[in-house]
Amino acid sequence: MTPPEEYLDQVRGAMAGMDPTVRADILRELRSHIEDATVANGGDVGAAMSQLGAPREIGRRYRGLYGYGRSFKILFLAVAVALAIPSVPVLSASTEGLFPYTLSLLFLALVAAWTIWVSVAAGFRTGLAAGLAAAASRVLALSVPILLGRGTAFTWEGLALFLGSSGTLVLLGWLPGTAKNAWSGPRVDL
């Protein structure tokens, strides 16, 4: 493998999760830039690539600029839903044990952490969508047993706490990504 191909392969690896057509266009443009810079530097490929910077950093910057592809965004939402459903505190079989509620709190913490990570890594729009998907799946998962009347009992205070924690997931999906954008400063054009 030639040095430019090794460089582009590292850039490709750092752009994992991006839309494949966008990634291919970026790599084609970088390849052309390396060729032009090599000619301008009298055939010195190393100098041409060093002008671009570290390949992994270039790939991460492009992924930050263009974001993840649709399939990864769907995966992020699916994981949020899968973590949110077991966070519904209807798992209790008796009032004497705290374990099922502890398990629900654990899953609530996991879905909150996941939603924050998605917001920071994939942007506030995807984080907001993950938070909304998690909150909606929690409400739906609680509504089904209530509507079916399958031995469920709830208090208004408990319902308010449940809805508040579900709404907090939406906020956790939106706020960290928005803060990251606001605090990251001006972006350098690639």
Image (cartoon, rainbow, N blue to C red):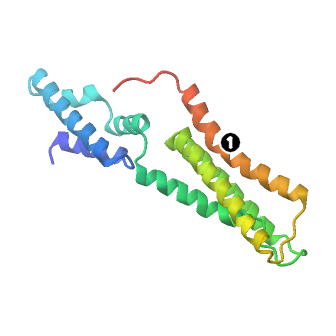
Q: Is 66 positioned to the left or the right of 117 in the image?
A: left
Q: Image height check: is 133 above or below 28?
A: below
Query: Under tag 1, what secondary structure?
Result: helix
Q: Which residue is at a point 53% across and 27% down the rendered structure image?
A: 184
Amino acid found under the numbered disc labelled 1: Leu
The percent position of residue 166, horizontal first and vertical second, equals: 73, 52
Q: Which residue is at a point 70% across and 65% down the rendered structure image?
A: 141
The percent position of residue 72, horizontal first and vertical second, equals: 44, 53
Q: Which residue is at a point 19% across and 36% down the rendered structure image?
A: 31
Residue 107 visible at all: no
Q: Is 104 positioned to the left or the right of 52 in the image?
A: right
Q: In the rendered view of the protein, which quadrant contains the C terminus?
A: top left
Q: How many marks?
A: 1
Q: Is 156 positioned to the left or the right of 124 in the image?
A: right
The percent position of residue 16, horizontal first and vertical second, equals: 37, 49
In-front residue for pair 56/22: 22
The residue that mark 1 highlights is 171
In-front residue for pair 163/144: 144
Q: Is 121 positioned to the left or the right of 36 in the image?
A: right
Q: Image height check: is 52 above or below 19?
A: above
The percent position of residue 104, horizontal first and vertical second, equals: 74, 64
Residue 168 visible at all: yes
Q: Which residue is at a point 37% across and 36% down the rendered structure image?
A: 62
Q: Quadrant of residue 2?
A: top left
Q: Residue furthest front?
A: 147
**Label 1 crowd bin: few (<14), some (14–19), many (20+), radius 10 Å:** some
